[in-house]
Image (cartoon, helix red, strand yellow):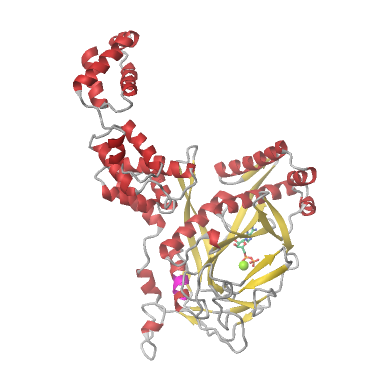
Amino acid sequence: MAATLLQDGCRCCVLLLVQGVQPGHLFKHLCRLRRGVRTASTTCKHARDTGAVRWSGVVGLEIHTQINSNSKLFSSSRVQFAAPPNSTVSFFDASLPGTLPVINRRCVEAAVMTALALNCTINKKSLFDRKHYFYADLPAGYQITQQRLPIAVDGTLTYSCQVGRKWNQIVTKSVRIKQVQLEQDSGKSIHDDARRQTLIDLNRAGVGLMEVVMEPDMSCGEEAAAAVREMQLILQALGTSLANMSEGQMRVDANISVHRPGEPFGVRTEVKNINSARFLAKAIDYEIQRQTEVLDNGGTIMNETRAFDYKLGCTIPMRDKEGKQDYRFMPEPNLPPLILYDAQSLPTNNVDPAQVVNIDWIKERLPELPRVSRERLVVQYGILPEHSFILVNEDGLKEYYQTVVNMTKVDPRKIIGWVIKDLLGHLRQQNLTIKQSPVSPFSLAELLTILENGTISSAIAKQVFQELCKGEGKTPEQIVKEKNLGILQDRAHLEEICHGILEGHQKEVAEIRQGNVKILNKLIGLVQKTTNGRSDPVLVKTILEEKLL
Ligand code: ADP
Ligand code: MG
């Protein structure tokens, strides 16, 4: 590893490996990288100002997503995540001679649906090709893909990034989609280092993939991560892929280069098989930084494939692409052209309409896409665009919020603060997902209802929320009762407390009487402190004002 990195010029990582870990050095290195990221993300042109030369990052993604279908692209074997090794393999998947592919309609429909959601033009005729390469987990020696004529071309993906000092601005961008193609997944090689052997699991062999190829329209890791997240949300809204990156249902290859604005694009490197949006952003920003440094030092960028080492936070070379691999593409002889129809071209005779894929039928049934959901939430609940962005982007948060809204009469604009600031804040701090939330939407709805109807004060509501976060299964009402947290509205009792506070704070009383009414809040706070946040703030204010003025 050290040798590889030495060649690669990642000086800081080399120092780490050769000289042993030097925390100070590592810190500086990471800071430098982070500074790079921040410069990039705030300008989002990703121009790196290095004296006379300004370099700008260029990023193009190729995204492979596994199609959510019961069976594989060309065989009837089951598709099941984490099934016992080699338990879902048909003769065709294992490439036994004499077996033939039969296309899975569901996979075709999923690709059409996805391509329509990405505003692509659907090719009514597309073709399958064999792409040859030799690898143990590819038993046929070739992958069936769509090289000459893919199922869809020329689309756009619109995505948004959160920017600004408080991340409270939403900037909308778009990236052009070059094509969407159908292809087979390969099997998996499992390397057993202890016994120095490689095992092959063919469960994944032949699972349907949609490859989405994007034009090089992005310029930094943050944009790429936002585009990938939007893709993931679209696929999940359509149901065409589960798109779970950590389970390998969505895998991203990032092509990265740098150039001076106005000049042709530079030589690119490709970072393969990234399976998390966070690592994707890191890998891209690292590559932009590395290439910039190489060029600034008079070096040249090699057209090579690299891998992201998430432990070291840097990319390392895998194999060079200089002598471009010859895949010996040839037409797949066992599959006829894939023909799709629209309302106008539906066949009238000899073809069962149920057996054809009708593009218009799919188009009419597209569900609400994430971008539309965000706009709808803003209009429907009167919430801010940045809040609706978070609701849609956090898995399960939109559903959580809507459940709370439906269960209480409290203004949705009040609920949003609790859901985003208090609930999400707590979950992020504890590293929990929405599903793992110790506070159910029902509990939050009940809490907000008793706050709204005046049973508790807002200070107590925060306290009850903290109790709910302990996940002991108690309802807000139970907590309020057990801890005696109900609001204090006994006027005589509150008057007595207010009297005591005024007696003890003559200086403040004098200031208020001289016209500095802001000091009144301090006295209200002191009453709340005495009553552990339980007193009715409106009543306390009235009493104090009566006594003072
Ligand atoms: P290939 O034929 O080598 O696969 P493509 O033209 O299909 O090349 O592009 C593959 C991917 O590389 C696309 O996602 C594209 O956006 C991206 N890409 C092409 N040129 C560049 C570049 N100079 N910098 C960054 N990405 C690029
Ligand atoms: Mg390509």
Left/right placement of residue 264 relative to residue 500 reads right
Q: Residue 542 sits in which quadrant?
A: top left
Query: What stretch of residues is rendered in magenta?
Result: 108-112
Q: Please, is residue 199 above or below residue 158 in the view?
A: below
Q: Residue at x 30, y 45 (%)?
A: 445
Left/right placement of residue 208 relative to residue 283 reads left
Left/right placement of residue 510 relative to residue 5 reads left
Q: Residue at x 66, y 49 (%)?
A: 313
Q: Please, is residue 386 above or below residue 317 in the view?
A: above
Left/right placement of residue 79 relative to residue 396 reads right
The residue lying furthest to the front in this view is 482
**Where does residue 506 sit, x and y in percent of width and height?**
32, 8
Q: Is residue 303 magenta?
A: no
**Where does residue 170 sit, x and y in percent of width and height?**
45, 45
Q: Nearer the viewer, residue 468 or 358?
A: 468
**Where does residue 547 sit, x and y in percent of width and height?**
22, 13
